[in-house]
Image (cartoon, rainbow, N blue to C red):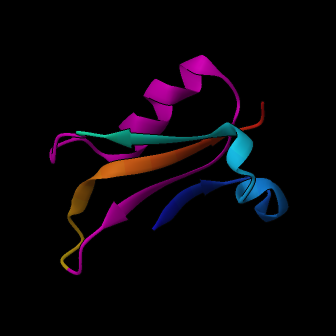
Amino acid sequence: MTWHEKDNTVRYNNAFNVYVQGIPSNVKPREIYEHFHKFGEIQSAKINENEFGVHNGYAYINYNN
């Protein structure tokens, strides 16, 4: 589930893509965005979920630069 996307053309640029693991199950996607937004402008952010809608404890954050 992608919960924040500004521009799909830049979304797959791995130069500024950060993989984050160890996210506790009680953390909401918006909280992840708000935390990582402190470090720069986010182009897109994705937190992976299982078939029951529970996230798997990791996310991808793609910064503009």
Q: Residue at x 49, y 49 (%)?
A: 60
Left or right: 11, with 3 as reference point: right
How many marks on residues?
0
Question: Residue 26's image quarter?
Answer: top left
**Outermost residue, top direction?**
38
Q: Residue at the location (41% across, 49% down)?
A: 59
Question: Between residues 34 and 21, which one lies in front from this camera angle?
Answer: 21
Q: Is residue 39 left or right of residue 56?
A: right
* Quadrant of res 5: bottom right
| Magenta residues (range) | 23-51
In the rendered image, residue 3, in percent from the top left (x then y), is placed at 52, 58
**Quadrant where the image shows the N terminus:** bottom left
- Is residue 57 shown above or below 2? above
Quarter of the image where the C terminus is located: top right
Q: Nearer the viewer, residue 58 or 5?
A: 58
Residue beneath the point at 37% across and 35% down: 31
Q: Is residue 41 magenta?
A: yes
**Identity of the residue drawn at 25% across and 40% down:** 23
The residue sitting at the front extreme is 15
| Location of residue 30 in the rendering, given as x and y in whole percent from the top left corner | 42, 43
Query: Vertical placement of 41 versus 51: above or below?
Result: above
Which residue sits furthest right?
9
| Residue 1 in the figure: left or right of residue 39 | left
**Residue 17 % position (x, y):** 62, 43
